Image: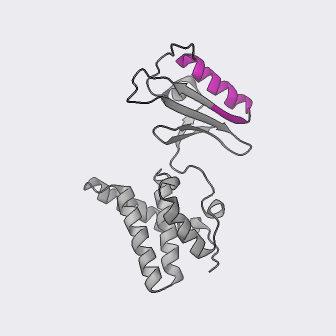
């Protein structure tokens, strides 16, 4: 089956889905759990009665999932199964790497706010002020590439904080890998 999908035509349904999962979350039901169960149930309905409307509903739920800031990779098998049935490519339907990104201004205070408590490395790594300055400089100059920043914590149980700054032709974003948070810069 070949479908043509512009998810923005379903904006009202996407927002309703996000709102509905928010109500459940206030009652103690995690949003991710609600959305994944919903997508799995829609897929079961489709398998019993292959109507295109079911697939559209599943895609709407996936879009809501992404816009709530959840990671596509965690349930990629389920999402890819639906996309394959629809004859769609992930990069066409869900082109962005991040959807729930926090918007920050390119100033020291907001860039510093993207980083958790910073522990200076014993091995001579960058201090927090140097990290902030480096990020701001690379973004201002639009230096294409992927840059990593490591906060070497002294607690082996916690693991190091690793951040990546991605500067591409069309996108510039900052990714807190450990907490899987995305930040985009307001120009």
Residue 134 visible in the picture: yes
In the picture as drawn, the residue positioned furthest to the bottom comes out as: 49
108 within the magenta span: no
In the picture as drawn, the residue positioned furthest to the left comes out as: 27
Image point 62% across, 62% down: which residue?
A: 90
- Residue 137: percent from the left, percent from the top? 68, 25
User: In the picture, which quadrant includes the N terminus?
Assistant: bottom right
Residue 93 lies in what quarter of the image?
bottom right
Taken as a whole, is the magenta stretch helix, strand or loop? Answer: helix
Nearer to the camera, 31 or 185: 31
Image point 45% across, 62% down: which residue?
A: 15
Image point 50% across, 55% down: which residue?
A: 67
Nearer to the camera, 36 or 110: 36
As displayed, is residue 131 above or below residue 87?
above
Left or right: where does residue 160 sit relative to residue 144? Answer: left
User: In the picture, which quadrant includes the C terminus?
Assistant: top right
Magenta range:
127-147
Left or right: where does residue 182 sit relative to residue 136? Answer: left
- Residue 64: percent from the left, percent from the top? 47, 60
132 within the magenta span: yes
Residue 114 visible in the picture: no
- Residue 177: percent from the left, percent from the top? 51, 38
State how the image is colored: one colour
């Amino acid at each position: 089956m070949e479908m043509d999908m512009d998810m923005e035509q379903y904006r009202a349904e996407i927002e309703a889905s996000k709102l509905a999962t928010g109500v459940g979350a206030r009652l103690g039901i995690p949003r991710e759990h609600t959305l994944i169960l919903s997508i799995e149930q829609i897929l079961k309905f489709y398998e019993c009665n292959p109507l295109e409307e079911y697939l559209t509903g599943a895609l709407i739920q996936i879009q809501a999932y992404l816009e709530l800031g959840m990671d596509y990779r965690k349930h990629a098998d389920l999402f890819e199964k639906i996309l394959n049935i629809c004859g769609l490519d992930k990069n066409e339907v869900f082109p962005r790497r991040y959807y729930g990104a926090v918007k920050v201004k390119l100033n020291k205070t907001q860039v510093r706010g993207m980083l958790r408590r910073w522990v200076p490395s014993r091995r001579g790594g960058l201090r927090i002020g140097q990290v902030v300055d480096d990020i701001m400089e690379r973004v201002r100059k639009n230096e294409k590439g992927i840059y990593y920043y490591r906060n070497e914590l002294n607690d082996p149980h916690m693991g190091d904080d690793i951040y990546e700054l991605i500067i591409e032709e069309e996108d510039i974003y900052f990714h807190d890998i450990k907490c899987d948070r995305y930040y985009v810069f307001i120009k």
